[in-house]
Image (spheres, helix red, strand yellow):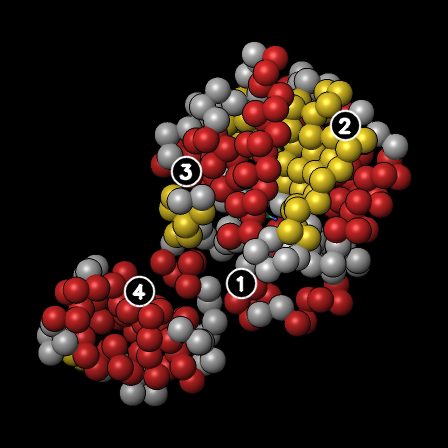
Amino acid sequence: MIGTDRSPQAMSIGELTREGAMLLLRAGIEQAGLETGWLLEHALRRTPLDLRTNESLQVEGEGLRRALDLLQRRANREPLQYLLGTQEFCGVEFEVEPSVLIPRPETELLVDAAVRYAGMQSAAGRRPVIVDMGTGSGCIAVSLARRMPLAVLYATDRSAEALRVARRNAERHGVAGQVTFLEGDLLQPLRACGVSGRVDLVISNPPYIAEREWEALQPEVRLFEPRIALAGGEDGLAIYRRLVQEAAELLHTAGWLIMEVGQGQAESVRALIEATGRYGTMDVRPDQAGIDRVVCAQKQ
Ligand code: GLN
């Protein structure tokens, strides 16, 4: 059995498929069969059809070692996306590695909101200037660049490793010339770019997990995703408190701040925005699960 037998010399694809699925099932992974298939396709560099029609084929050497390693790591609850190296977002594949948060489907709502609000502003005939704070894998900035070829984008992150991944994703999708990547805290790196008061949109999916929520996170998230991308201080709102202020400096009048928020945070974030006295109209949008997920506020 995988995980008990030290190092089998050879296993058939059928054995790997069945035993891999058992291993993942025992580790509490719901889609054990599907995930085993994806991991074996990746490790053995074979198509799903290949695997299904070659069940008796013996796997050995490097291929077997890769397959067993990936299955064991997944059984230890390492996220599937880090093992496969990619995650789909807004219809295209993004490279991910443990230095970046794995893009989530609900974050696509931010991209939709940004496209809508940028469209409202482009009536003036200018190229929209958009800032993505805490870009991580670059999924938001790159998706916006793809959907708005005229937009000028700046993407910041505190993590140099994350920015390397984001740059590779921009190159992969042919938008590297459209996005300027800047290392630093929140919106501070923008100060040197001469865009204060000229930005149309500030968009961010900031870290928003509160300290008390940490222990209840899935092991995939808690043990493997970057804490710097998740932890939002004691109450989860630490980054919002600063971001609403810093964004107000960058945005021009009528520009929009667009932020993802965690479950149950929309009201508190709205209150933080109101307390600055620098924004007018607000718009809160739910995700597919009905959770208020995107908070938009217009600078006044
Ligand atoms: N902007 C990236 C995303 O939405 C990273 C966000 C983060 O690291 N908190 O996936």
Examine the rendered structure and indicate whether residue 205 appears above or below residue 253. below
Front residue of 225 and 9: 225
Specify the amino acid type for callout 2.
Answer: Lys
Specify the amino acid type for callout 3.
Answer: Arg
Residue 47 % position (x, y): 19, 60
Q: Is residue 217 visible?
A: yes
- Mark 2 or 1 closer to N-term? 1
Label 4 or label 3, whichever lies nearer to me, is 4
- Mark 4 or 3 closer to N-term? 4
Q: Residue at x 41, y 38 (%)?
A: 168
Q: Badge 4 is on which residue? A: 38
Mark 4–mark 1 contact, CB under 8 Å?
Answer: no
> SS class of the residue under badge 2?
strand
Residue 23 % position (x, y): 37, 82
Q: Residue at x 68, y 66 (%)?
A: 214
Q: Badge 1 is on which residue? A: 224
Q: Badge 2 is on which residue? A: 299
> SS class of the residue under badge 4?
helix
What is the CA distance from the residue labelled 3 to the residue labelled 1? 21 Å
What is the CA distance from the residue labelled 4 to the residue labelled 2? 46 Å
- Mark 4 or 2 closer to N-term? 4
Mark 4–mark 2 contact, CB under 8 Å?
Answer: no
Mark 2–mark 1 contact, CB under 8 Å?
Answer: no
> SS class of the residue under badge 3?
helix
Q: Quadrant of residue 132?
A: top right
Label 2 or label 1, whichever lies nearer to me, is 2
Mark 3–mark 1 contact, CB under 8 Å?
Answer: no
Q: Badge 3 is on which residue? A: 168
Front residue of 134 and 291: 291
